[in-house]
Image (cartoon, grey):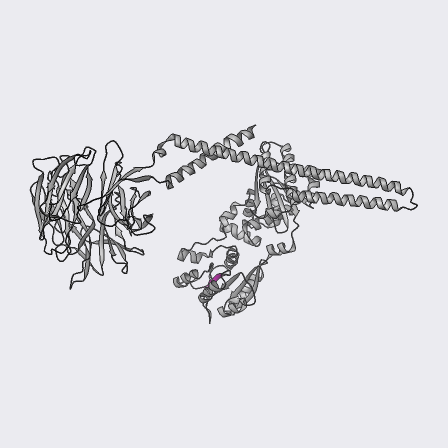
Amino acid sequence: MIKKWRNYVFHPLIIGFILSLIVIFLFARYLPRFYTEIVEEYVLTNNGEVYYFDLNKDGNSEKLHYYHYDRIFKPTLYLYDSNDNFKSLWNFLELPVKNYKIFTGDYNNDSIEEIFVFTQSPDSLFLYVLNSENDREPYTRSRFITTLSNPESEVHILPIGLYNLNQNENKEFLFAVDAGYPYTPSKIFSFDISSNVLSSSPEIKANISKPILVEDINFDTKPEIVISNQSAEVPGNGNGSGLIVLNNKLQYLFQPIVFTGGASQITVDAIKYGNEKLLAVLHSGTKPENVFNSLMLYNFSGEKVYEATIANKSNSVLTCISENENKIYLFNGKKIYRYNSELKKEKTYTISKGNKTECIQRVDITGDAKEEMIFRSNKNIIITSDNIRHKVKLNLPDKGKLNITIAKHKHKPNQVSIQIGSKWYLCEFYKNEAFFYSHIFYLSIYILISFIVFLILKIRLRIRRFQKSIRNNESDLFNQVEDNIEENFTGLKSKIKEISNELTDDSYNKIIVEIDDTLEKVKTASKIVSSKYSTDEDFENQLSNLVSSKKDKINISYRLFPDYGFSTLSHEIKETILEYSDNCFDFIANHSKNINLVLQVIQQNDYLNLLMEIENIFIDSTEFESNSKLKSILNKVKGELVIDNFSGFGTIINATIPLNITSDSVESKKRKIRIIIAEDHDVSLFGLVSLFKTKDDIEIVGTAKNGMEVLKILETKNTDIVITDISMPGMDGIELSEKLKNEYPNIKVIVFTMYLENWFVEQLIANGAKGLVSKNSKIIELIGAVRNVYEGNNYYCPQFKSKFGLKGNNNGISKKLDSLTKNELYIVNLYAENLSKEQIASKMNLNRKTIDAFIANILLKLNAGDEEEIIRIAKKQKFVSE
């Protein structure tokens, strides 16, 4: 009943909860958060423009229609209220500035936004400040701005905003005028509307661009103005963009820093660096054939603090997409890269995977005080969330001047007004995330997934029952076949007996014997076929189920080592392990209560160890060894059983089962590590050959005096590892490692050298060297390097690691020590105390077979070659001091 409750209620609820979290996370990560739809569109005539602004701050936007007309009619600006009722109009004597987008703002803090319109005559530029709520004085101000010296040049007006530059009650209107330097000087202007005073900056010898930064960066309570700009080609002066910073009086805070060279641009942002603010300045190219990006930090004395070259395949600009003062953002038209104050890249956001885009503006579309980002390519308008994680595309491939404003509505979602050239679109835009805040949504997902898990578990159980039924049916079928065959053979024997009455010799008895032999052969064949068609569960699952079934009687933990290869064991061996373990567990459980037992199933080359370690319980060896059932189980596979009482710890039960492994597989497991040694000094070569000949697991297939001789050996012999010196006549070790990497990529290289120079090490690692051992190291280090590299690890001796900071997997020894049991660790500890195998066996009261089994397991787990290496590993891991 408890098992059914667990399978049909507890498991579905837990698994359903986990899967629900994953599904909700995927919803949050990949489900579109924005939804947009074009609800209205038409073609504007008379060079018309459409804008939406909430001029009276009532939560609803008024609409402006600005018609340029032609020279017959005067340019006219029409104002409509939020219900599309006509409200007011303004006529202008001069022509509109073509690329100017109408700007609105509240300069005198009366909650009414004024409208700022620029016009131009052939030689002059004018500004009109319009009051939308005062019919008697619709023109708050009209002001001549500057003379235009070149009538053919196109004027660019960049409204920067309303700022309190002079620290008085009202704000000044800050804007940039760029008519194409050097024909008309580029300048920053400040217009004090209250006093009708116009101020301008010195002449800026570059083309002004966005972004323009206005904020108090040097903490003097007055805003500074930092200008992004592009280099202008000036006859005789070449190209030059620069870092230009103005104070609140529009004078240079420090002299401009000019960056000369090819066509380039400067974009700026502010970043907090410790307790101060610095200017982030990006100097980059403007043409595809001239790509470079240099990111710098300047203080407000004009001193460079830090510089970094940005590796990017295209020119980038700094863009202001976040109020986070500790980050800056670079944009290359397709991706945005976030950098910290150390100029280290932290994150990448993809805006477009196809065409390049430009960042148009930041604006709060949904009214949640978070500004969305708007990008434009030659095919799409892309709107992203404030954190750039979500985006939506509008397929609007039209070309021309782009105006985007927000039609605010107090009682319904805001709309986006988009005008491209003469085409105008009104779009619905809202966040598609209401369900993320719905408890019903979460509960529905949880119930649905839990139900699906329940169905899967139910179907899985039925499949198991069906498979079991098939196995039972097969068994019944084979039993029926045996019964039918035996019945037929019995009938045959009766008929032969009747015939035998007429025989005079003993031929009858011979026939009966042959029939009985044939019957036994048929039964044997039936069992073989039955075994072949039976479907066993995975061995580890069966062992796990067996351990779980005994947990009420005995506390068992088990380990399989290695954690692979058990699937190749024969069916008979697996059944023996399970049957033997089952009976052992029952025998031990009947002996005492609250027993802790560790079972290890360890596969050696040609035998299997079943080692049971029982803590603090002493079992009479005579009683255990006389158990006829356990003996008969092991006798079937020619196994041996040894039991020892471990002084101070408990009881050790060790069963050894020989494995019927083919000669090929044994040879594969016992295959030695093949090495070639390249060393030009005879004494060193003789010493290395003598060393490796003492190791049973390593075979020398050739020796060489230089790299060419190594390659000659490889034409006729195979090897796993080449051990080489660096300095050798002819082809040295560095050139040899490169050759082996290119021509024999499966051969691993260990460099055994006295050279520790940086260049050598970098080159060798680049050439794929897996081991670096100094000739000043202990010679045993080289043996460890060979075994480690053969296993697929890197090996760097302490001299190389300490000098170059290299990280190698020196035998992964800590992980391997974790695989040892408490008793095995105790034996390793005794080895480290310089006790011999016989002394350890005597101290632990173990017989020879048990201590041999323990040592074989330790050697296998630590990948050690002999007992001396166990001692070395123990001392290296500080079991004892040397």
Residue 304, image x, y percentages: 22, 54
> From the viewer's perspective, is 37 left or right of 218?
right
Q: Is residue 377 found inside the magenta-colored segment of the image? A: no
* The residue positioned farthest toward the front in the image shown: 72
> From the viewer's perspective, is 853 left or right of 82?
right
* The residue positioned farthest toward the top in the image shown: 1
Residue 359, image x, y percentages: 26, 48
Q: Residue at x 42, y 31 (%)?
A: 444
Residue numbers of the magenta segment:
749-755
| 753 w.r.t. 452: above or below | below
- Would residue 78 be seen by someone viewing this image from the given angle? yes
Q: Nearer the viewer, residue 444 or 174?
A: 444
Q: Nearer the viewer, residue 730 or 132?
A: 132
| 463 w.r.t. 704: above or below | above
Q: Is residue 754 found inside the magenta-colored segment of the image? A: yes
Q: Nearer the viewer, residue 861 or 623?
A: 861
- Would residue 847 be seen by someone viewing this image from the given angle? no
Q: Quadrant of the N terminus?
A: top right
What predominant SS class does the magenta segment belong to? strand
Residue 59, image x, y percentages: 21, 33
* The residue positioned farthest toward the right in the image shown: 504
